Amino acid sequence: MKRIFFAVIFSICGFYYSFAQSPQKIIDSLKIELSKSPKDELKAKIYGDLTWYYGSISTDSALFYGKKAMALAKKIKDSVFFAQTISDNAVIYYLKGDYSTSEKLFRESLKIRTLQKDSAGIASLHFKIGNIYGKKAQSDSSMVYYLKALNFYEKKKADVIVNSLKSNIGTIHMALKNYDKALDYFNENIDFFEKNNEYELLGNVLVNRASIYLYKKDTLQAISDLKKGIEISEKVNSYPTLGTAYNNLGTIFNDKKDYQQAKKYILKSIEIREKGNLKTELESSKLTLAGIYNQLGEFKKSKPILLENIKVFKRESVTDKLLLAYLQLIPVYAYESKPDSVSYYTELYVKTQEVNAQETMQNITSELETKYETEKKEKEILSQRANIAEKELHINQKNTQIIGLGILAIVVAILGYLFYNQQKLKNHQLQKESELKEALIKIENQNNLQEQRLAISRDLHDNIGAQLTFIISSIDNLKYGFKITNEKLTSKLSSISIFTKETIYELRDTIWAMNKSEISLEDLQARISNFIEKANISTEQTQFNFTIDSSLPNNLTFTSFEGMNIYRIIQEAINNALKYANANTIDVQFIKENEHLMVSIVDDGKGFDILQVEDGNGLNNMKKRASEIAATLKISSEVNKGTAIVLTV
């Protein structure tokens, strides 16, 4: 749940995505003032304001004016304003996801404000630096800076900022898996923000609390909090919170394997994060979307997203996301039957894991070596003072030996831990490779299954179809070759011939479905039109109308199982209307209703009383087919007022 970590930087930075008036209008008025060539002091202030308001529209434009403001503040030697411009630029880099540059600028501003003894400015920067450490998942450092800031704002009784800080402290407890403690903080925050109409902060805390409920396996409460957070955040156009909330909803439904619903929410998250220019979070949402496409087997859609992800995450050194992108590309190339690419990204994934572990080990070792060198220097200093205080030298030497042994023990322990962790990573990779092999076997089995289906369909067509045709031919020969005068026998032979012909039609429909891995809307339309045309020929009494909503997407597809069941339900409904309803008109319509496809079959026949009629095989078959494809079937009818059957997919 790192996606939702520490989203409240705007509460202390003052950087909200909702303003009393449009940011663009404010920017336009500031540019008019700038065109009047004001003095440097006023121009610097205008540059600073442009930095501020552009932050919600374009971070690149914000940085352009931010650098101008910083340079001019330095020129006019206004140290207070110079510290503020440095901090403003740091906020913009934070929004761009460049946390290293952001931290560097915040610390530079902190030095100036410390010299100025600006306690309010120092507290503000402690809050912001705490957010930076939060983004880096360094919870202990983040907590230190938050507590420093909290001490100041509690003394000043700045209740809104105090609760914002406590919200972030609650998020730290959540990261440390102290879920009950985190929940206490969030519940307190929610009560305060609701009473004081702090909608931006309220929406963010609700999104954070939803994560707690997810950890506690209370998915329903988590979804409820996320939807409430969205409703509140939309009032103030809080793009960061909205983007996070929709992203987390998508993740929940992805975990529930409801990939269509997951895709809907992730696409909404992407739309919002693009609008808010939240670049790092945007790439994270796109990576999640690529994973959903992989789950749906839509590898052609996921591939370009993942390749772009890799470029961005490499550039921004986001190693955990980069590893996930590599991992997601492996099944894509497996689907494309490109073993070299599969091997390449598998090796790249393993090497990146190893490099990441090695870098961690080098950083820790370097720190320990520095400490060890410091101890050696202290030892040399003590030896130079040996003539003055020999007893003190002996004591310090012993202490140094103890410290050296302690450091050596720490180094050995850390190296052992890193070796264990590296071995664990290798075992994890072996497991992933095993899963990949299983996936490849599954793909091969699916290919074999498709070949078997084609073979069965050929056998049905060549053998069963030919035999049924022979039966029809034999019956016709009996009827006309032997001049049968028995009317009952003639009628019986005719009914057998008709039944056999219908069986051939049914067989052809089955073969049609078996030969397709998926059935498009166009395929289904053609099949239904063909069936209606045949039905029209068989009866002169009934007029057929078949229409398709033009707003339905042309690329709409179904699995062969879904498409065949939809077709059979329509076929059964029309047959029932022809056999029992004495209808003059039968209307078949395909309608787009929100995100659903509605198929309606309506006739103006004699109808029936639903409460009085027991379901026959036809109605039961339709209901069973609808249930098998997770669709709903509604049947309504009145005597002498016709019948309506509506299938919602």
Image (cartoon, rainbow, N blue to C red):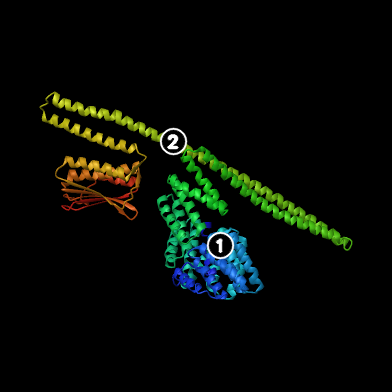
Specify which label sits upstream in the sequence, 2 or 1. Answer: 1
Q: Is residue 258 visible in this depiction of the protein? A: no
Return the x and y of residue 179 as percentages of the image width and height. Answer: 54, 60
- In the image, what residue occupies the spot 32% across and 38% down? 513
Disc 2: which residue:
445
Say which element carries label 1: helix
Label ID, residue 396: none
Classify mark 1: residues with Cα within 10 Å, few (<14), some (14-19) or many (20+): many
Determine whether 246 is above or below 631 in the image.
Answer: below
Residue 68's spot in the image, x, y percent? 56, 67
Q: Quadrant of residue 459?
A: top left
Name the mark on residue 93.
1
Q: Secondary structure at mark 2?
A: helix
Question: Looking at numbered disc 2 in the image, what kind of residue is underneath it?
Answer: Asn
> Marks 2/1: CA distance?
50 Å
Disc 1 marks a residue whose amino acid type is Tyr
